[in-house]
Image (cartoon, grey):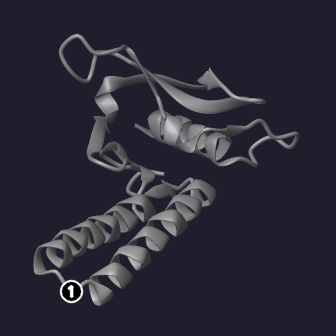
Amino acid sequence: MKGSRRTFRPWLWNLLLAAITVMFTGVLAGIVVVEEAPVAKAVYALLAVGAAVLTVRVLGQRVVVGPEGIAVHDLWRTRRIPWDAVADVSYQRAGERLLRPTWAPVLRLRRPLAEGGPIEFELEMIRSFRSRTPGQTVAERAAGAIRQALAAR
């Protein structure tokens, strides 16, 4: 595993949210085309550009397990977790409960990532429903890849 990268994406949620933001972008762009008032046209154009940027950000959400650590690319920022900060990884029930319980990889850290931060970090972006077949969900595969990479250090 040393030197290699594995990327895990919540494709279903990424694509659903991207479809919604693409629709907003299209509606706003259509308004820009038919709008005659210059100020309104400018406002709708800015909103359309913002929706397009959001679409790109949504499609870029992912968790990357690499030789230098774990990078969590979410909507607004990228959080990097170096391997020396990770003590252990577990696959456990996620913090929130919907109709069915969801599961996610949870990192137990040697030290908080930020002053006063938590000692556990849930990779909630890739949470999933528990599978009857071990290793089939994105969350299970990510937890396994993180365990492998941590052991290879």
Can residue 11 be seen?
Answer: yes
- Type of the residue with mark 1: Glu
Residue at 36% over, 68% down: 56
x, y percent for residue 107: 47, 25
Of all residues shown, which one is farthest toward the left?
39
* Residue displayed at 56% across by 43% down: 126
In this view, 103 is above or below 140:
above
Q: Position of residue 1 (x, y in %)?
A: 48, 51
SS for tag 1?
loop
Which is more toward the observer, 153 or 66?
66
Q: Quadrant of residue 81?
A: top left
Residue 122 position in % (x across, y down): 48, 28
Relative to 87, does residue 137 appear above or below in the rendering? Answer: below
Residue pictured at 66% horizontal, 31% vertical? 103
Q: Is residue 147 left or right of residue 66?
A: right
Question: Dot 1: within a 10 Å radius of its alpha carbon, few (fewer than 14), some, or many (20 or more) residues?
Answer: few
Vertical placement of residue 14 versus 36, above or below: above
Residue marked by disc 1 = 36
Query: Residue 92: in sight, yes or no?
Result: no
Residue 99's place in the image compared with 30, above or below, is above
- Along the line of sight, which residue is nearer the eye, 54 or 109? 54
Of residues 25 and 139, the one nearer the viewer is 25
- Left or right: residue 10 compared with residue 43: right
Q: Residue at x 12, y 81 (%)?
A: 38
x then y, percent, for residue 141: 64, 46
